[in-house]
Amino acid sequence: MNLEVGQQAPDFEAKIETGETIKLSDYRGKKVVLYFYPKDNTPGCTAQACNLRDNYEALQKAGYVVLGISSDAEKSHQKFIEKQSLPFSLIADPDKKVHEAYGTWVEKSMYGRKYMGTARTTFIIDEEGKIAEIIDKVKTKEHTAQILK
């Protein structure tokens, strides 16, 4: 599914690291940074999460709620949050339903080998639940600057 700026962001229901179920529609009236990343505790994903953590106050001041999402399980998210002191929730999507709704579960290639994985992509969703921006060339160490530009 190819989503575009201006479209309604697909609503979803999924569990965060605490086991609590959330829905995207719970955040209506707020701007949401929904960022898809491949895997907890890997170098690029840690750099991206820590950049958002280090600039979290600025993101909050700009009115953003930050939600990360990967296909990792809740327990993995808990460990990642604890280890990196992340101040935001991470969504567990082990069945890849949310990834598929957002078109971020894609065929990738490394060293000539093809496999399915997460396309590192950030969706900025406005207060009405519409996609305001799609960042598909994520700079992991400068991600907040890409959001707040």
Image (cartoon, rainbow, N blue to C red):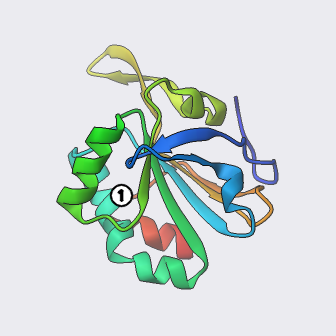
User: Where 27 sits versus 74, above or below?
Assistant: below
Would you identify the image quadrant in which residue 49 lies? bottom left
Residue 25 at what x, y percent from top left? 72, 52
What element does badge 1 sit on?
A: helix
Query: With 109 as the anchor, is 100 left or right in this view?
Result: right
Left or right? Give the position of 49 relative to 82: right
For the residue pair 104 and 60, the one nearer the viewer reads as 60
Report x, y in % for residue 144. Answer: 45, 70
**Can residue 29 be seen here?**
yes
Q: Is residue 39 above or below residue 17?
A: above
Q: Percent from the top left, x then y, of residue 107? A: 47, 21
Q: Residues within 10 Å of mark 1 (few under 14, many from 20)?
A: many
Residue shown at the point (31%, 16%) measured from the top left:
112
Which residue shows up at 48% across the image and 23% down it? 95
Residue extending furthest toward the left: 83
Position of residue 115 in the picture relative to residue 78 (left or right)? right
Residue 63: where, in percent of width, then height? 61, 78
Residue sitting at x 51%, y 25%: 106
Query: How many marks do you count on the picture?
Result: 1
Q: Quadrant of the C terminus?
A: bottom right
Residue 44 appears in view: no
- In the rendered view, would you say 117 is above or below 87? above
Q: Pointer 1: what residue? A: 140
80 or 50, nearer to the observer: 80
Give the amino acid type for the residue marked by disc 1 in the picture: Thr
Looking at this view, is 53 or 140 the one in front? 53
Q: What quarter of the picture does the N terminus occupy?
A: top right
